[in-house]
Image: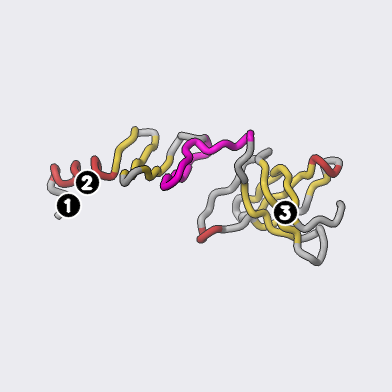
């Protein structure tokens, strides 16, 4: 592999238990890394999928070690929601499967049972007497 500290590649295998992935570099004759740790932002666990584009930081000691920083937005990975003051956290494997979303002062939760705002949930708890 060419000596490049920052690389973009595709996830080729995943070790879920240990939080590690290997990455293939299509522009380097499909060479594949050993398993590298997947970066844990604020101790959050959400592994990428096979074939997803990821950013890799190789250590200065050489291409044999590094850390996979995560996915990035591109034409194959477009945000489902965008704009100033908006936040969306996808929780499921498929986009839209399960998420938490914030927009204009409202928090929305969505999963297989449906969609509800935080206001709806609090009102429901008050109606059933389950909130002080």
Give yes or no for residue 34 being in the magenta stretch: no
Q: Mark 2 — residue?
A: 122
User: Which residue occupies 24% across, 40% down?
Assistant: 120
Left or right: where does residue 37 sit relative to residue 63? left
Cα–Cα span, label 3 and label 1:
47 Å
Give yes or no for residue 93 being in the magenta stretch: yes
Q: Looking at the picture, tell me which residue is in the foreground, 93 or 60.
A: 60
Left or right: where does residue 126 sit relative to residue 23? left
Residue 35: mark:
3
Q: How many marks?
A: 3
Cα–Cα span, label 2 and label 1:
8 Å
Q: Mark 1 — residue?
A: 131
User: Which residue occupies 14% across, 55% down?
Assistant: 132
Q: Please report whichever mark, 2 or 3, sits nearer to the chain's N-terminal start.
A: 3
Residue 5 higher or lower than 49, as above or below: below
Left or right: where does residue 41 sit relative to residue 9? left
Q: Looking at the picture, tell me which residue is in the foreground, 38 or 17.
A: 38
Q: What stretch is highlighted in magenta?
A: 75-94
In contact (CB < 8 Å): disc 2 and disc 1: yes
Cα–Cα span, label 2 and label 3:
44 Å
């Amino acid at each position: 592999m060419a000596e490049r500290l920052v690389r973009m590649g595709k996830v080729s295998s995943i070790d879920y238990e240990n939080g590690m992935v290997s990455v293939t570099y299509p522009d380097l004759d499909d060479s594949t890394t050993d398993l590298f740790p997947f970066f844990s932002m604020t101790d959050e666990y959400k592994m990428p999928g096979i074939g997803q584009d990821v950013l890799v930081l190789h250590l200065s000691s050489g291409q044999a070690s590094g850390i996979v920083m995560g996915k990035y937005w591109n034409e194959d990975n477009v945000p489902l929601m965008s704009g100033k003051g908006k936040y969306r956290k996808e929780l499921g494997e498929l986009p839209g499967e399960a998420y938490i979303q914030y927009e204009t002062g409202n928090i929305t939760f969505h999963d297989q049972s449906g969609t509800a705002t935080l206001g709806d949930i609090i009102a429901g708890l008050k109606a059933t007497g389950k909130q002080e």
